[in-house]
Amino acid sequence: MNNYRLASIHLKLQTLDKWQRARLRYCIWHDWKKPERKRKNLIRLGLEKGLAYAFSRTRMGGWAVAQSPILFTTVTPSRLRRKGYESMLSYYLKTHPQIQ
């Protein structure tokens, strides 16, 4: 029973982390607001100029962009970690070391 609960918590935290990263990407995209700022920021994140131009002018909604390769490949979990985001699962494992 205890192992089942541990696995259940692990999967729930992974699911929440995935959703939260998508929400963060959405907020970043929404914060950029204008296509020109989106293009410049995509280039800063390492995207090729032509792709950045095309992606910055997409007609997809913010939530769709957050889950697409446009932001999935540029706003990566490692970049979020460097900016201070710590996943719930890593925090849980850090605060409960005996469970690992």
Image: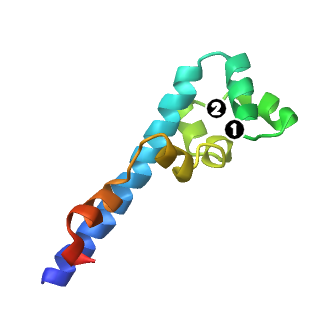
Residue occupied by mark 1: 45
Q: Counting other residues with Cα less than 10 Å from the Cα at mark 2, is it few (<14), some (14-19), or many (20 or more)?
A: few
Answer with left or right where residue 63 lies relative to residue 40. Answer: left
Image quadrant in which you'd find residue 51: top right
Image quadrant in which you'd find residue 97: bottom left
Q: Which amino acid lies under the numbered mark 1 shown in the image of this protein?
A: Leu
Answer with left or right where residue 86 lies relative to residue 77. Answer: left
Q: Position of residue 7 (x, y in %)?
A: 26, 76
Discs 1/2, front: 1
Q: Is residue 88 above or below residue 97?
A: above
Q: Counting other residues with Cα less than 10 Å from the Cα at mark 1, is it few (<14), some (14-19), or many (20 or more)?
A: some
Q: Position of residue 72 (x, y in %)?
A: 61, 47
Q: Secondary structure at mark 2?
A: loop
Query: Measuring 76% from the left and 33% from the top, which residue is drawn there?
Result: 43
Q: Is residue 42 above or below residue 22?
A: above
Viewer can see residue 17:
yes
Q: Quadrant of the C terminus?
A: bottom left
Q: Residue furthest left?
A: 1
Q: CA distance from mark 1 to mark 2?
A: 20 Å
Q: Nearer the viewer, residue 71 or 82?
A: 82
Q: Position of residue 3 (x, y in %)?
A: 19, 83
Q: Which amino acid lies under the numbered mark 2 shown in the image of this protein?
A: Met
Q: Nearer the viewer, residue 31 or 45?
A: 45
First in residue order: circle 1 vs circle 2: 1
Viewer can see residue 57:
no
Q: What count of labels does the image hold?
A: 2
Q: Is residue 31 above or below residue 62?
A: above
Residue occupied by mark 2: 60
